[in-house]
Amino acid sequence: MTNMHGFKEISREHLSELNGEAVIYEHEKTGGRVLSVINNDENKTFGISFRTPPENSTGLPHILEHSVLCGSKKYPVKEPFVELLKCSLQTFLNAMTYPDKTVYPVASPNEQDFRNLVGVYLDAVFFPNLTPNTLMQEGWHYVPEEDGTLSYKGVVFNEMKGAYSSPDSLLYEATQHSLFPDITYGLDSGGDPEVIPELTFDEFMDFHGKYYHPSNAYAFFYGDDDPEHRLVMLDEYFSQYDKIDPKSEIGIQAPFTAPVAVEKKYAASDDGNQKAMFTVNFGIGRDRDSMSDLELSVLEQILIGLPSSPLRKALNDSGLGEDMAGVGLENELRQLYFSTGLKGIEAEDGPKVEELVFSTLRELTATGIAREDIDAALNTIEFHMRENNTGSYPRGLSVMITAMTSWLYDEHPLEYVRYEQPLADLKARIEKGEKIFEPLIEEIFLNNTYRSSVLLLPDSNVGPEREEREKAELAAARKSMDEAEYKAVVAKAEELQKEQEAHDDPEALATIPRLKVSDLDKKGKEIVCEEKGEMLYHDLDTNGIVYLDMAFDFAGLEDRLIPYLPLFGRALVQTGTKSTDFVTMTRRMAAKTGGISPSSLVNSKHGVDESYTRFILRGKATAERSSDLCSIMGELLREASLDNKERIRQLVLESKARKEQALVPSGHIMAATRMKARFNEAGYINELMNGISGLEFLRELAGRVESDFDSVVADLEAIRAAILNQANLLTNVTLDAKNFASVESTIADMVGNLPAGSTASATRNRQAFSKAEGLCIPAQVNYVAKGANVYEHGYEYSGAAHVISRYLRTGYLWDKVRVQGGAYGSFSMFDRSSGSLSFVSYRDPNLTRTLDTYDGVADYLNNLEVNSDELEKAVLGGIGEIDSYMLPDAKGFTSMVRHLSGEDAAFRQAIREQVLACSEQDFRNFAKAAQSVADNGDVVVLGSKKAMEESGLDLDLVDVL
């Protein structure tokens, strides 16, 4: 056993799953735990986690997660987190609250930058500067109004008001709470807005003292940094503590002896168009290990993983609802559970959904699960494990979350990270013909009394009644105060405001460690790309996986067909083909490939009101299965059954339901999309496909599917005939050269079997939008946007614009809209190609105040004294954004986008040089762009109709939901 820097080594093993070595340590003085993964991944990851079981639904763990990042002993600035956002090369910097743990992860490809991030985070969690004002800002506080009444404000308070406006979020919470009523999982660690104001400062401090301690800590490292230095950094903090027993164990819910039924309501509009949601939920009482969890994951994939999966298909085919509900298998808590159902149902149909679930499961156990479904499920899971494609998230973060699934509950941290042996064993058992999944269905579902049903009903009274309760609570609080107590509340609110408006001391800011601009590469790195006719090829190490993008220009589509494109893409891959029925085709895709999915790409060309538009069919598979991939993609493109009425109906209803449910969690995106539709062709096309206009189209289309399906089929076939041909096609391939040599001809053959076709360009007749628009939904918060095309008002582009837009997001807008205004977030969105500049808020309690803040951007930039230190931080952050870390498939796709944009390497290098040379004058120049938004900008607000009506703004109101 090795002892090093206060830690004793518990175990060390090579893991082929991680291409490296995993070492487990224990801190000798405190018992603090460490998992140190050493491999060649340059995207280095660190995370420190704590068990944080809540005792109520005040959101204490969530509020504390925000608060510890608001200044610490070594870094006494208001928000070190924001300072790091400004000036780091980070590829991940965040914190997350789970039902039973709080996690603080960071990542960076630069070792010194990585060490800086780790140091700031360790100081933040162990020695935060927590004050009553911190709780007031991040949690909740009273705000005295001019008329002598009180209101609530707080970042988490408003964040959770947004969450409680989302039916999907409410259904998730109700489902989990229904199965775990007696333990921590029956509470809301994020915070119930009606309970958050019960949280006191003493409780706040006690919680930190009890749980934010090395004895309750789980530290994780991953990547190619110095493994010994990891321990040095940890011991600096761990060694300042003595060992304690935090008593943070997560309890076990006793199984039910009989099922329970829960009924809840969500806020709906008065029109009565919104429908109910229903889930049936099963607590899983079996002991957990890697094999058991793998069996359950495969079973989940068998039952609901594919559109053709038997349980999912039965629910969708029933006509009882519009889309699937439930989370499937939830495996990140101590106790597993499985949840499924339907949304968009009639309230009285809940029992029918429940009976359908059980009858389908009974039939599967009686007739047996098709081997094709098992093979498809197993291949999907195996491909996902081996590809380890975490998208824009660091791979190390995924490993850490997986490790915590066992580690947090005192099991081995590598229990679920090691997948090779359980996977091999399970495949061997299946090959021998062992019946694994039918007995599992009987155990988990059919013979299980530990279950619940949740019915979530729309109710137009919920919102007004909630508002009235809040008003009454505030009125009672005001009435209970004598004059001295009220004056103290006024004084505290004023004190907080002064503190929020004060600037950090330059000496304190200087404590935040960072790189220097001189440490940065002056020359940008280009992605390898070879043009081979109408094929782009990227010779990158993809671990033997071929990534294939078939990108078809749809510039020739007339306006009325463009809203179909998202549906058209889903129909290509989810309706079957003339040669292969829907069920067989989806099984084949899952068994032979890593997935085939549609997407669309629409962007402006730089400096002109023109766009490049591509409908993309994206596929991936192991190189040895490239012929299967090409065969399937070719068949889908040529023969998809676009006249499959049952499937088209389901896809339309699913798409509509998903857009409606996205309005609250993605309200800022919807508002920004609507805004950009005014400024350029690309923005208009995106709105038709993905915005409120797209939602309105789907609602109308749902009726047409029933009344005039022939015309729908004719439109879908017109799209196929117009765009799916060789003339419109750009093929994009990412794969290493050795494998590409054997794949290239297969791809060429597939392309050669497509129609020759011809290119075309349609004239766009862009819709006029109101100058000030209010999009009304039943929500407790708003999403406020204001924007303009600043090129039309004289702004000349410089790469420095990206530095300044980012600076606004992490400075002025953060301070004014989030910290002082209480919104959860705010964004400055600048599109260099089109010149659109939009300011957008997220889960915002305000409306006119936020618009006033946007109008103040120009004055702020004109009066800002940008010292060399602030300027250097801004440049560092700008380069970090340009040099964002990408996995191989993302590099290949990004290279294709660059090719289509017409922006070459010289243009990108010029932008980089302008970023590096950013000066105070650039801030003044950008102030002119911001002033044009203030003077000429359009306004789009998505949110509460009542708030808009009371705002005094002359908004044209549209009822969206």
Image (spheres, rainbow, N blue to C red):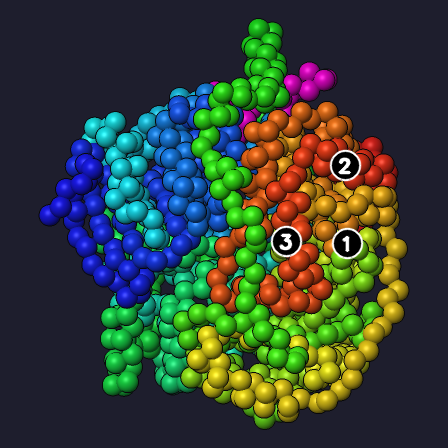
Q: Which one is in front in this view, the residue at disc 2 or the one at disc 1? A: 2
**Where residue 432 appears, x then y in whole percent?**
25, 85
Residue at numbered disc 3: 909
Dot 3 crowding, Cα within 10 Å, few <14, some 14–19, many 20+: some
Please, what secondary structure does the residue beneath circle 3 have? helix
Position above or below: 307 against 603: below
**Residue 232 has which mark?**
none
| Of residues 518 and 323, the one drawn nearer to the viewer in this rendering | 518
- What is the spatial separation of the Cα atoms under label 2 and label 3, in whole angstroms? 21 Å
Q: CA distance from mark 2 to mark 1?
A: 18 Å
> Magenta stretch?
132-151
Residue 137 magenta-highlighted: yes
- Residue in the picture at 25% in, 27% down: 240
Say whether disc 3 or disc 1 marks the residue closer to the N-terminus: 1
Say which amino acid is labelled 3. Gln
Q: Pointer 2: residues within 10 angstroms few (<14), some, or many (20+)?
A: some
Element at badge 1?
loop
Residue 834's tag is: 1
Q: Residue at x 77, y 70 (%)?
A: 562
Query: Does the stretch in magenta take in 147?
Result: yes
Residue corresponding to mark 2: 925
Quick one: which residue is furthest to the left in this view?
Answer: 1
Name the residue at 59% across, 78% down: 574
Q: Quadrant of residue 656?
A: bottom right
The percent position of residue 957, horizontal first and vertical second, equals 82, 46
Which mark's residue is nearer the viewer, 2 or 3? 3
Q: Amino acid at mark 1?
A: Ser
Distance, label 3 to label 1, CA atoms, is 19 Å
Q: Amino acid at mark 2?
A: Asn
Residue at 65% of width from left, 63% of height from top? 898
